[in-house]
Each structure stands twice: as C-alpha cells, then as structure tokens.
Amino acid sequence: MSFQVVQKYEQGEIRVSASRLFQLARRLDMPVSYFFAASADGDNIVDTALVRAEIELIRAFRAIGDTEVRQRLLLFVRSVAGQAVGTEGVNPAASDPMKSDAK
C-alpha cells in the first residue's frame, strides 16, 4: 500500500469497509474498537470534525513565519486552555517548538 493511499484513508477520502476494518484489526491483533477514538468515558465516538479543525490549526500555526509570534500564540493558547503552568520567564526564541522553521 503506497503512502498516498494511506494518506487518503487518514484524510477520509477513501472509506474503509467493515470487512476491511475487521481484516486490519485481525492482522494487527487489535480489537476493531482500536480504530475508533473514544471519549474519556469510553462510550461516545469523538466527532471527526474536531480532528479536522486540529489539523487546520496546526497548518495555520506552521504557516506563521515569525518565531516570536508562534511562541506567543502558543503561550496564549496554553493560557486559554488552563495549561500555562511553568511558562513564566520563558524566552520565546529559546523555547520555540518550531525552531527549525525560524527566519
């Protein structure tokens, strides 16, 4: 199976039939439920639109050329999410997660 075919499956351009999913699960020695993202309670399937939104967010983030802007955006998102613990005194240029893309 080529990389492009796998990518099309991942992006939902090609659908996987139930029988193919069952075959994949058997080959990987995993339950079929392994292929479905579940919520924290394990009962509800997570909406795939959320996954697409996350992908769009990552693509937009990577398109930002200024490393300081990226770092400040990351700090902002963490603070909005309530995860800003330990970010005080961080040098944006020194801790840039996208350092290799720096201008």
Image: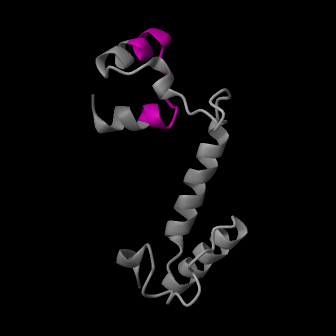
Residue 14 in view, yes or no: no
Whether residue 59 is in magenta: the answer is no
Which x, y percent locates residue 89? 55, 90
Q: Quadrant of the N terminus?
A: top left
Which x, y percent locates residue 63? 51, 69
Whether residue 19 is in magenta: the answer is yes
Q: Nearer the viewer, residue 100 or 83?
A: 83
Compared to residue 13, the image places residue 49 above or below, namely below
Q: Nearer the viewer, residue 97 or 58?
A: 97
Which x, y percent locates residue 86? 56, 78
x 66%, y 75%: residue: 76
x 49%, y 12%: residue: 18
Span shown in magenta: 8-22
Q: Nearer the viewer, residue 30 or 24?
A: 30
Q: Nearer the viewer, residue 70 or 76?
A: 76
**Dividing the picture into quarters, in which one does residue 29 lie?**
top left
Which x, y percent locates residue 73? 62, 76
